[in-house]
Image: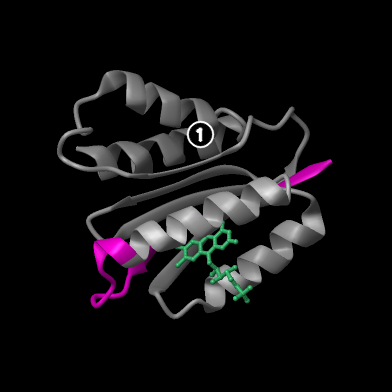
Amino acid sequence: MRYAISYVSTANLELKDQSISDIMTKTNEFNKSRDITGILLYNERSFFQLIEGEKNIIEDLYRKIAEDSRHHDIIKFLEKPVSRLPFDGYMTDFITDIKRFNEAKLKNYLHYIEVLNPESQVALKRVVELMMV
Ligand SMILES: Cc1cc2nc3c(=O)[nH]c(=O)nc-3n(C[C@H](O)[C@H](O)[C@H](O)COP(=O)(O)O)c2cc1C
């Protein structure tokens, strides 16, 4: 049984694009090596993240993330076991002006959210859409 945690947060003001890229690179490497799947998105100072994997690993990672001084106002809105099959790999992305109206990309993000229950899906789709428009 896999376990999922999802939250939104606000990046600290002094955090530059390069530092956000560094977080994303490290996240990709670490998460792939620990069979953690999900998504990390960043746009206009907001992070949106879903991490999914073995329960202890996810709980330990979330504790670290929550203590990370590079972001604040962390709002965890989902934490539960998930019975469906995991998605392949981990995905991180900046959402920029260029990507804003890329429907295919949006569908790709929303596909990741399908692992969650229907009520959470509605809320999360709203969060992702708000981040992209
Ligand atoms: C918004 C945000 C999301 C993060 N997501 C992950 C993640 O999914 N996986 C990861 O290994 N580190 C992630 N990190 C980095 C961790 O907070 C932490 O720096 C990293 O696990 C290294 O911890 P350590 O130095 O204690 O090993 C994230 C940081 C931030 C600010």
| For residue 72, side relative to residue 39 (left or right) | left
List the residue tagged with mark 1. 121
> Is residue 132 shown in magenta?
no
Residue 115, given in percent of the width and then of the height, sits at: 62, 31
Tell me the residue at 40%/75% (across/down).
70
Tell me the residue at 74%/28% (across/down).
85
12, above or below 28, in the image: below
Total number of numbered discs in the rendering: 1
Split into 4 quadrants, where in the image is the N terminus? top right
| Residue farthest toward the right in the current orientation of the protein | 1
Q: Residues within 10 Å of mark 1 (few under 14, many from 20)?
A: some
The magenta span reads 1-18
31, above or below 62, in the image: above
Question: Tag 1: residue type?
Answer: Gln
Quarter of the image where one finds residue 2: top right
Tell me the residue at 25%/68% (across/down).
16
Residue 30 in sight in this render: yes
| For residue 36, side relative to residue 47 (left or right) | right
15, above or below 115, in the image: below
Give the quarter the ligand 1 occupies: bottom right
| For residue 112, side relative to residue 19 (left or right) | right
Split into 4 quadrants, where in the image is the C terminus? top left
Residue closer to the observer: 123 or 32: 32
Dot 1: element: helix
Residue 8 in sight in this render: no
Residue 98, given in percent of the width and then of the height, sits at: 16, 34
